[in-house]
Amino acid sequence: MNGAIRENLAEIYPVSLAQADSDIWDHFLETCAVNSGPEDLAGLLSLHAARYSLPGFLPDLARLEWALREVRSAKTLPALPSRIAVNPSLSLLRFSWKNLAGLLRLGADGAVPNPEEGEELVLLWRHVQTGEVHVRPASCEDLLALKLIVEQIDPGKTAAEAGLSIRSMEAAIDRAVRGGLLIRPPSSIRREFSSFTPGGEDAEALSASIFTLQWHITQACDLHCRHCYDRSDKVLLEPSKALAVLDDFYRFCRARNVRGQVSFTGGNPFLHPNFPDLYRSASERGASGFLSGEPGRFADAQRLDSRTGSFRSGPRIPRRAARPRHPLHGDAHSNRGEYGSGASSCRSSPDQNGSFYL
Ligand code: SF4
């Protein structure tokens, strides 16, 4: 190994070299690395590390540092794909030792566990937006998200076969996108009007990351507001057709790279005979939800949450409460105080992650 290449070693393998005294390294490199390049270090360590009493995890650690160098030296960030795709800078390495990623101390604070014998899969990638390089052990959720995208598996079909919810699979994909393992193309729901953005500074306002289905599921209502615009009888959608609507909605959002939301309204959505099933089915398809109804049913909403165990909820602010009292109709079923009580419920709600739905 010539001097120039030798100098590169300290730059490429700082953590590996720190695992043994320089005398040992000198001896090792002078006898084992003649005519070798920096890229050969992991292979040489696999063959000879034991003979020089070097730690058993060093071949894997050197392989990890070389892979890190490759990810860092990628010149350009990948362009956004036309469909959701794996970040092209991503590497998945299989090691015979655990806890090696922590030794690199990329953004790590505190104590790092010592390497232990045992298989571990490690991911390395460069985030498309930030350009930052990340290294960490792969979780089961990471591997699920990568498999779904690499093998172009339909989450809906797989979820049904595995007895899981689409929601859990979509959540795994969403987290992988946020972490940079996957790259999602931009929303295809967008305005194209150039006049909408004088000067072009409002580009973000041209596209929607969320698409909302406002679904009037029932005419049934237990109130009789003067301002009600429609109390006519309408036939309820059959349950199978209602599920088909949700399936269509799921496919629509997925094809356009947007998150789905379903706003259930009516009438009073709680008076729909299959409302819990609809609510749960929307949640299982990964949609977040809104309830648009009348006041006095927060307790119903919370019971519903405990049954489904999955639908994000916040206290509803009734539609009437979100606007000032109507000067003509306010007295019959008064809006008096509803805005205040709704806002007060929001403030006092114990755990809603800041998500309140009007
Ligand atoms: S609560 Fe809504 S649906 Fe019911 S009567 Fe009033 S306006 Fe009509």
Image (cartoon, grey):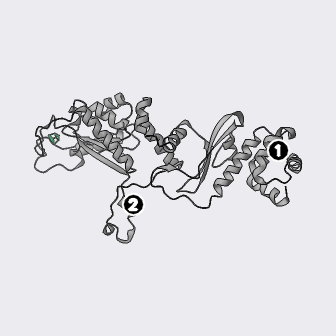
Residue 211: image location, x then y, percent: 33, 49
Q: Amino acid at mark 1?
A: Ala
Residue 264: image location, x then y, percent: 26, 40
Q: On the image, numbered disc 2 is attached to which residue?
A: 204
Q: Earlier in the sequence, mark 2 or mark 1?
A: 1
Rendered-image quadrant of the C terminus:
top left
**Residue 60's quadrant in the figure?**
top right
Nearest the viewer among 208 and 328 is 208
Residue 159: image location, x then y, percent: 42, 34
The residue lying at 22 percent from left, 50 percent from top is 323
Q: Amino acid at mark 2?
A: Glu
Residue 118: image location, x then y, percent: 69, 32
Q: Is residue 268 left or right of residue 7?
A: left
Q: Looking at this view, name the residue that lies furthest to the front.
A: 151
Rendered-image quadrant of the N terminus:
bottom right
The residue lying at 71 percent from left, 34 percent from top is 116
